[in-house]
Amino acid sequence: MSFLTSSKEPTPVDEPVGEVATGARLLPRITIQAFCEHSQTAELVEAAVHDRRMSKVALTTHNGGLEGAIESYKSNPTPNLIIVETSLPTEEIPGALDRLAEVCDASTRLIVLGHVNDVLLYRELIRSGVSEYLVLPTSAQSIVNAISDLFAAEGAAPIGRTIAFVSAKGGSGSSTVSHNVAWAISQSLRQDVLILDLDLPFGTAGLNFNQDPPHGIADAVTASGKVDPTMLDRLMSKAANHINLLTAPAMLDKTFDFGERDFEQVVELAQKTTPVVVLDVPHTWNAWVRHTLATVDEIVVVAEPDLANLRNAKNLADTIKALRPTESEPLLVVNKLGVPKRPEIAAQEFANSIECRLIGQIPFDAMTFGTAANNGQMIAEVSANNRTNDIFRAIGMQVTGRSIPEAAAKSSSLKLPSFLKRKKAS
């Protein structure tokens, strides 16, 4: 795990905080968990949610301080930002933060609330990867300013991870897989997920989530560069807790012809405002699909275990690798395994043939999947105990970087927390 190192120069911890600028930006849809040692600190952090910049933020407070955070994240996923209060002696704080880093995800950021006004400690924590150190007592506005500097300032790194699902062959089920994986991510990590249904004439995101919003992805794409975070918010529809959609119009009253970069602005804006962005890419091949696949963080090819899918998946995999020589290679999900009386290619043999890592094997289950599709529900809603839910969850953890493949776990090249790297180097 690596808490993002602050790029700004350390400032005096007692510097007065100015008024909020009129044009201050809203924070993206991040999740924040605060672990406080004192009730006054918890009240202070909770007061921060009343700042208008925090209107999209999900913030919860817990007891226990730094030790409470360490215990909690041994068995729970970490949010986008952790705020911890500590009254430990100066010399014990770095060691405790090392233990916290060991149980946190690589993308999590950290703000420490301390009781020691020590510039040397401040500099050491910033160098070790802590995003900010604030001395108590402080104000709610100071906390919001610190959060805003991390997530909403000019040049702030995008918070979202973009994951594209694409079928090797029409009917392979990439839309169903992508929607259920998005659901699994939202429920397991309790972070906001935005689904972009890029199949404008035939998209099924609205059907699968039983939504029929008046606006969607077509309005965002045709806004001719005028789309901004406020407009994107208006166009989204909320399908469930932590699930948002930009649905396709699914109408044939006009043709949908796009330029190579027409979706680029929408995807980049979504990446700046939502922690996980799932792209449901149609089974077609043109300039904008090619460009979109070249620019996302992860690509998942969904295929059925037959020869036509094998040929198409191989072509896709080779092309994607050539498009992205320095990026992650495409991943593979084999869908509809075990169709009665159908000869099949073994999933691992399929993966070896196209030289992609197999991250999921989904069995054919006509009754469950058919019921879910007809009801506009996810598999977890139709059958909570169905083992396919575990497969979707495992895929979700892989594509968001939350789990380590078995082979990598045995490797000596595992990424260490930034704290530990620096200590080992020294």
Image (cartoon, helix red, strand yellow):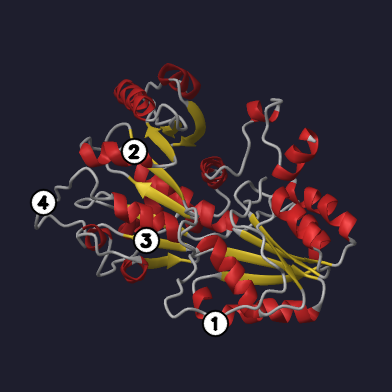
Nearer-the-camera pick, 134 or 228 = 134
Residue type at numbered disc 4: Thr
User: Which of the marked residues, 2 or 1, is nearer the chain's N terminus?
Assistant: 1
Question: Quadrant location of residue 410?
Answer: top right
Q: Which residue is labeled 4 in the image?
A: 255
* x, y percent for residue 422: 75, 40
* x, y percent for residue 95: 84, 50
Q: Residues within 10 Å of mark 1 (few under 14, many from 20)?
A: few
As measured in the structure, the alpha-carbon distance from the residue carrying label 3 to the one carrying label 2 is 20 Å
* x, y percent for residue 201: 19, 52
As measured in the structure, the alpha-carbon distance from the residue carrying label 1 to the one carrying label 3 is 35 Å
Q: Disc 2, disc 4: CB below 8 Å?
A: no
Residue type at numbered disc 3: Leu
**310 relative to 359 in the view: left or right:** left
Q: Which residue is labeled 3 in the image?
A: 245
Q: Secondary structure at mark 4?
A: loop
Q: Which residue is labeled 2 in the image?
A: 293
Residue type at numbered disc 1: Glu
Q: Which residue is labeled 1 in the image?
A: 19
Nearer the viewer's eye, disc 2 or disc 1? 1
Q: Is residue 201 visible?
A: yes
Nearer-the-camera pick, 413 or 16 = 16
Q: Disc 4, disc 3: CB below 8 Å?
A: no
Q: Residue at left 71%, top 25%?
A: 412
Q: Secondary structure at mark 1?
A: loop
